[in-house]
Image: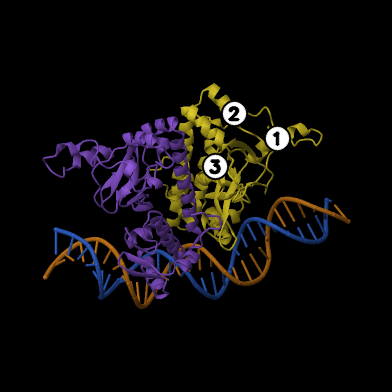
Chain colours: A purple, B yellow, C orange, D blue
Amino acid sequence: MDARTRINAEYLMPTSSDASLASRNFHSRINCQDCAISELCLPVALLESEIEHLDSIIKRNRPLQKGEHLYRAGDGLQCVYAVRTGTLKTYTLNNEGTEQITGFYLPGEVVGLDGLHEHTHPSFAVALETTMICSIPFHQLEELAGIIPNLRMQLLKIMSREIQSDQELFQLTKKNAEERLAAFLVNLSTRYAKRGLSAQNFILPMSRGDIGNYLGLTIETVSRLFTRYQKADLIDTKGREIHLKDMKSLSQLAGTNCHSSV
Amino acid sequence: MDARTRINAEYLMPTSSDASLASRNFHSRINCQDCAISELCLPVALLESEIEHLDSIIKRNRPLQKGEHLYRAGDGLQCVYAVRTGTLKTYTLNNEGTEQITGFYLPGEVVGLDGLHEHTHPSFAVALETTMICSIPFHQLEELAGIIPNLRMQLLKIMSREIQSDQELFQLTKKNAEERLAAFLVNLSTRYAKRGLSAQNFILPMSRGDIGNYLGLTIETVSRLFTRYQKADLIDTKGREIHLKDMKSLSQLAGTNCHSSV
DNA sequence: CGGAATCTTGATTAGGTTCAAGATGAGTGG
DNA sequence: CCACTCATCTTGAACCTAATCAAGATTCCG
C-alpha cells in the first residue's frame, strides 16, 4: 500500500496520445526554480545549481483529488512531501477508530516529517481539495543534506519551525473555545498572508466538523462561535468563505504568545 | 531508588577552594563515551571515533539548581542542550504574563530544538531539581552533522521524534481531564522505563500545579483525579511519590493511539 | 429536482472551573 | 526538638462553559 504505487496505478493520462506525460514528472515544466512558493519551502537560501540538484530528486505525480490519501498510517516512509497547491489534512485514529486531525498543510509546507525516525508514517494524509504534491525521497534528501550545507540547515529549520508551531498548538489545551477558534483563524490568516494571499479574505478548505475535530470542540460549538463572532462584528462568513473584519480583536482573543515571532 | 537520590550519589558539590572546576568542563571525567544514557541521546549509532568527535564539542558546566534557568525566551540560541540528570521544564508566557508549560525533559532528551530557525529561544527552560546539562554548540553540531552521516541522521531522528510526540501531545485537546492525566502518567512511566528506571514507581519531579498547567487543567481537578484514581485502585500516591498499580487500565483510559509505536 | 451531507439553532445536562477553607509538608530559626 | 511560616495539596459547594441530544435549515452534487 505504498502511496506512490497507488498514485501511479490510479493515474489517468490527460491525453491518451501523450504518453510521455505519464513518466516521472506529471508536469515537466514544474520545477523548484520557477516555483512561486520556493521561498517557503526547501530551496530557501540555495544557489541556483543547488536548487537544480534538489529539483532533480523531486518527483511530481498527478494531483490528488479531494479525499485521496497521500499516505496512510503504517505505510513505510520513502518520501517527505511538500504541498505545491491545495490543502492536506493529517490525522490519526484513536482507540475507537475515530479520526483525530493533527494538522492542515498549505502550499510550501512539508508533511511526513513525523515518522522519519521509525521509517513509518504515524498518521494519515488526505487531500481536502485538488492538491499538487512534490515528493522528495527522504534518503536522497538526507544524502543531499550532507553535500549542501544550506539545504541541511534549511531542513533543520523546517523541522525546528514545525516543533515550535506544534508547541504553540499545544497551548490550545489552555484556552477556551472562543480563544481556540480565534487562534485558529488568526493562524490560518497569517499563513495565507505569507503565501501572498489575503489575510482578511479566504475560503476555509476544511469543514466545520474538521475545525472542531482539530480544535477539540464539537461541530455545534464551532458553529455557534462563528455566529457569535459574526454578531460581535469580528468576522463575516457565508459557508466556507470568511472575512476577518477585526483582526486586532481576533488576535487579542487568540492570546498570541508574547515571544511568538509568528 | 528515586531519580534524585541517584543524582546525589553521583554528584558532589564543588568546594569553594577548587576554582578550576568552574571552567569549561565541570566534571572532566564525564563524557559521551561513558554516559549511561547515550543510547537515548545524540551518540546513537555513532562509531567510537565519531562519539569522541561529538564529545569534544560538548560543554558541561556546573549543575543547575532547582529553579535556575538554562535559557530564557528571547535569548540568542548558541546551543542545544541534552539533559544528563535531573529534569527541566520549558514554558512560555501568555498575554497576561502567566506561565504556560510546554514540556518536561528527562535525561537523554534534547531541549532547545524549537527556535533553531530564528536563532532565538522561543521559550524558557528551568530546572525542576538539581539538573546536569550537556551544552552542544549548535553551529558546531550542524557542521559535524555534515561530516558524520550517522550524526546527521540521529539529529533528524531526534527532531522527528519531537514532532511526533508534540503531535501526540496535541491530541490531549480532544481528551477529557481523566484521560489527560492518565495519558500524562503513562507517558512519564514509559519514558522512565526507557531510562532503566521503574515504570511503576517513580517520583514526580513536578508539582500538581505544574501538571495542571501542562495539561490545561486546574490544580484542583488534578488533585481530585489523583484521589479518584486512588479510590479506583489505579494508582497509589503519597505526595509526589507515585505507584502505578494498574497500568493496563491507565493506558486504556489514556486512549493511546492505534499507530503509536511509543 | 431530490437526497445526502453539512451547518445552524435550541434545550438540557455534565464535566471542570471558581471560590473558599482546611490539611499536610518542607524549610527555618530559636 | 519544637514552633512557626509558607508553599503545596486536598476537599467541598456553587456556578458556568461546552457537550449532548434533537430538530430544522442550507448547501452540495449527481
Image vertical order of residue A202 relative to residue B127, above or below: below
**Looking at the image, do the residues carrying marks 2 and 1 touch, with CB atoms under 8 Å apart?**
no
Q: Identify which amino acid the numbered label 3 is placed on.
A: Gln
- Mark 1 lies on a secondary structure that is loop
Callout in the foreground (3, 1): 1
- Mark 2 lies on a secondary structure that is helix
Q: Identify which amino acid the numbered label 2 is placed on.
A: Asp
Mark 3 to mark 2 CA distance (whole Å): 33 Å
Q: Residue furthest front?
A: A48
Q: Which x, y percent locates residue B114?
A: 52, 46
| Residue A37 shown left or right of residue B123 in the figure | left
**Looking at the image, do the residues carrying marks 3 and 2 touch, with CB atoms under 8 Å apart?**
no
Image vertical order of residue B239 relative to residue D17, above or below: above
Which residue was labeled with disc 1? B11
Q: Chain of mark 3?
A: B
Which residue was labeled with disc 2? B55
Q: Identify which amino acid the numbered label 1 is placed on.
A: Tyr
- Label 3: how many residues lie within 10 Å, few (<14), some (14-19) or many (20+)? some
At 34% from the left edge and 40% from the top edge, which residue is drawn? A74
For residue A72, say whether it is visible. no
Q: Which x, y percent locates residue D29?
A: 18, 60
Which residue was labeled with disc 3? B200
Please identify the quarter of the rendering in which residue B38 is found.
top right
Foreground residue among B152 and B177? B152
Mark 3 to mark 1 CA distance (whole Å): 26 Å
- Label 1: how many residues lie within 10 Å, few (<14), some (14-19) or many (20+)? some
Q: Quadrant of the C terminus of chain B?
A: top left
At 68% from the left edge and 42% from the top edge, which residue is drawn? B64
